[in-house]
Amino acid sequence: MFNNIYDILKVASHVADYNICLFAPRYSNHDGEMSISTITEVIKGEEEDQAVYIYKCKNGITYVESHFSGQTESQIKDKEITYSKCD
């Protein structure tokens, strides 16, 4: 069982030819539209001793997975790139 996208990417990183896409529903996009985009980078960080994940997508949108609402990338501490995929 996978707890988050990061867990899936750890498994997928061993596959030679793959793309992992993030589906974002309307409510999570500023333009009110659904989107699907390839994840190009994942950054893992911390906020109040909790893991926080930043997902950067090929379409230029960045999503933050956090237990704290309203987190932005600049508020996250101890960031490190844990996944990167270039075309």
Image (tube, rainbow, N blue to C red):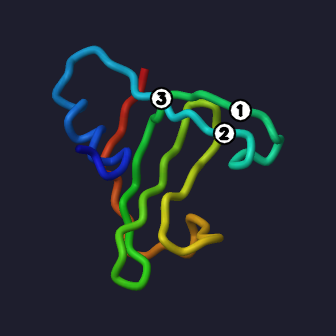
Q: Which sits earlier in the primary sequence, circle 1 or circle 2?
A: 2
Give the side of residue 26 with respect to residue 67, left or right: right
Q: In this view, does 13 lie to the left or right of 52?
A: left
Tell me the quarter of the image containing the C terminus: top left
Residue 66 located left or right of residue 85: right
**Residue furthest toward the top?**
17
Q: Mark 2 points at which residue?
A: 25
Does the CB distance between marks 3 and 2 fall below 8 Å? no
Q: Which amino acid does label 1 sit on?
A: Met
- When the figure is inspected, residue 50 is found, relative to residue 2, above or below; the finding is below
Image position, residue 29 (x, y; %): 73, 45
- Quarter of the figure with the N terminus: top left
Q: How far apart are marks 3 and 2 (CA)?
A: 13 Å
Residues under numbered marks 1 and 2 in contact, where contact means CB atoms less than 8 Å apart: yes
**In the visual, does 61 lie left or right of 7?**
right
Tell me which numbered mark, 1 or 3, is placed earlier along the sequence.
3
According to the picture, the residue beneath numbered tag 1 turns out to be: 34
Where residue 69 appears, as percent x and y from the top left, is 61, 71
Q: Name the residue under label 3.
A: 21
